[in-house]
Image (cartoon, rainbow, N blue to C red):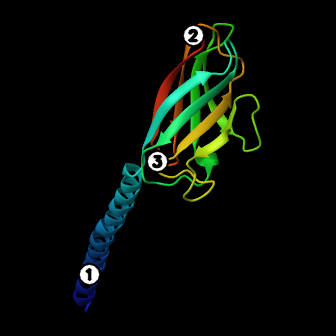
Amino acid sequence: MGTILGGFIVISSFLVASALMFNSFLVGPLAQSQSMKDMTRTNSSREGSGLNITGAAVYTAGGSDVWVHVDHTGSQTVADFSEMDVIIQCTDTSDNLILNHLGYNAGGLDDNEWTVGVTGVQADSFNPRMWDSDEELTVDLRVSPAIKAGTTAWVVVATPWGVNDQSSITNP
């Protein structure tokens, strides 16, 4: 009787372990497959986006206000400008190298912030107040402390999907 009971426990343990292993073999690839689908969807969204900075300059020599014209060459609409990133690297008036991630301010400019320029999105005929393909956006930004005169700064503009472009700005 003891031998039969011991054999039953061994066989039961083997069946439980086999069921657990089989379940993990089914669930693991399913989770991996879902992750691959999510990654493909994200990459497809990113491929549909594109930016081209067509111009950037300081408004007044030695000043801290900058304008940037960005052409939307992709197919993804940007509906919420606060999800975009604007980063600037420059030399300030004290010869310090500054790297700033500027915050978005829909109400206007303050130190180390950016906003959509007065002209807004140009050729804004499709999806008003959204930035669609083949439209140009004017970005106004204010850097504090001011950009040193006679130096070059770099500005990066990025969409919520991580697509970006950069341009140099020479402060006369």
Q: CA distance from mark 1 to mark 3?
A: 63 Å
Within 10 Å of disc 3 (Cα), the crowding (few <14, some 14-19, many 20+) is some
Taking the spot 34% from the left edge, 58% from the top edge, the residue there is 40
Picture quarter with the C terminus: top right
The amino acid sitting under disc 3 is Asp
| Closer to the camera in the image, 161 or 37 | 161
Residue 19 lies in quadrant: bottom left
Check residue 84 in the rendering and tell me which mark sits there, or answer none. Answer: none
Q: Are marks 1 and 3 in contact (CB under 8 Å)?
A: no
Residue 105 is left or right of residue 135, and the answer is: right
Q: Which residue is mark 2?
A: 151
| Closer to the camera in the image, 141 or 13 | 141
Q: Which residue is mark 3?
A: 134
Taking the spot 29% from the left edge, 74% from the top edge, the residue there is 17
* Place of residue 131 in the rendered image (x, y in percent of width and height, measured from the top left): 55, 50
Taking the spot 72% from the left edge, 44% from the top edge, the residue there is 106
Work out whether 50 lies above or below 100. below
Element assignment for label 3? loop
Q: Which residue is mark 1?
A: 15
Work out whether 95 lies above or below 142. above
Q: CA distance from mark 2 to mark 1?
A: 74 Å
Element assignment for label 2? loop
The amino acid sitting under disc 1 is Leu
